[in-house]
Amino acid sequence: MKALCWIGKSTVEVQTVDDPRILNPHDAIIKVTRTAICGSDLHLFNGFIPTMEEGDILGHEFMGIVEEVGKEVTNLKRGDRVVVPFTIACGRCGFCKKKIWSACDNTNPNAHLMEAAYGYSGSGLFGFSHMMGGYAGGQAQYVLSLSPILDH
Amino acid sequence: MSEPLNESPKAEELPTLGSAGVMLEGRYLPPPEDKDGKIWIRTSTRVEASADELYAIWRDVQSAPLWQEQITRVAKTGEATSHWVMQSGDKTIEWDSEVLADEPGHRIAWRSIDGESDNAGEVIFEVAPGGRGTMVTVLQEFRMGKLASAWETFVGRNPKQAVIENLRHFKAFAETGEIPRIQGQPHGGRGLIAGIKESMYSEKVPTPPALNRKAS
């Protein structure tokens, strides 16, 4: 698929990259229909955010159609139209239970990097440097999205 | 207003945060010092689950490879003993471990008895106030040379950081049944520097599989 990759300071390039695949049971693949550019993307673009590496896919404001869902996803099915928020939340940790999704404890695989910089890690974010998860963003044809486990 | 605010940013010695923090009386405890040739680590977290559930997951040593990094296999060899196999890059390390203290729902203490790793540790489960689940505190010591430790830090994961990360994986595993992962994600061409940085961020250490242990 094609995706917008950060190459270096103030340089981005559309590259052909691998398609995303389901990694965890609560994942979903979204076929992106529209994506926006945020003001904070400019910080990434201009290289002000440390831990941005060559080849990172940008984009955290996107929407699309669900293409494929993981085994444990119950609230989405193929064909649903979704808008995906910036933050990635697990739905089960102490913060998620209080609906403070951007402080989720369980979605940042590189939490140690964020702790070194900020003292405590926030949630994983789409397309926002390795410190904040290193997740591929939504300025691409397909995105791997994670759906929170919510007990209704 | 008695006195103008006198700001001096470096007025007090702040403990260097080398671990997920442990707090006592509202302040972070400094990380424990390495002494007597042993590397010491203490870390804690709050998990939204009951102490009994968490004790059961931790005590089930044979499922340790699901949530602990770089552990390939654990075989129970007796009531309180087990055999551990760890794979770090091309190197395989094996050792036997024995449980020294086993208090269901409260505490597990262990140490290695034989083999290529000299370590001991303890995990304590305490009920968190306010009905907020359980505070899990892990203490671990390794007898590992400075050179070996530096090498591990360079090629994979700093041993102290591995304990912190294992606790993070344990928390994610206990609360959601899965561990967040980015390995296998799409990305553009990584240059040489980006490849080196990936190793430095320990992104090349395989994330434990955490085969889903409970349905949503």
Image: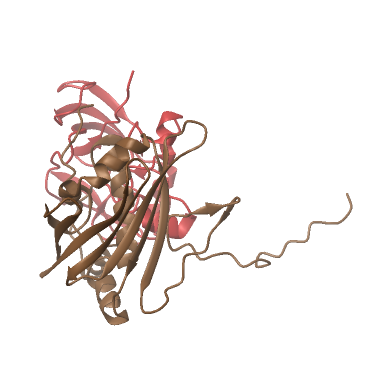
Chain colours: A red, B brown
Q: In terms of depth relative to the viewer, which is nearer, A78 or A141?
A: A78
Point 22% across, 56% down: residue = B69
Count of marks, rendered view: 0
Give the x, y percent position of residue B4: 83, 56
Give the x, y percent position of residue B25: 60, 51
Give the x, y percent position of residue B46: 42, 43
The quarter of the displayed image where residue B202 is located = bottom left
Residue B71 visible at all: yes
Give the x, y percent position of residue B28: 54, 56
Q: In terms of depth relative to the viewer, which is nearer, B203 or B19?
A: B19
Q: In terms of depth relative to the viewer, which is nearer, A70 or A14?
A: A70
Q: Which residue extends farthest top?
A: A152
Q: Is residue A89 left or right of residue B179?
A: right
Q: Is residue B141 left or right of residue A95?
A: left
Point 42% across, 51% down: residue = B44
Q: Is residue A18 above or below residue B141?
A: above
Q: Is residue A73 above or below residue B136?
A: above
Query: Looking at the figure, which quarter contains the C terminus of chain B?
Result: top left
Q: Is residue B90 left or right of residue B54?
A: left
The quarter of the displayed image where residue B139 is located = bottom left
Residue A86 visible at all: no
Point 17% across, 34% down: residue = A25
The quarter of the displayed image where residue B189 is located = bottom left
Point 58% across, 64% down: residue = B14
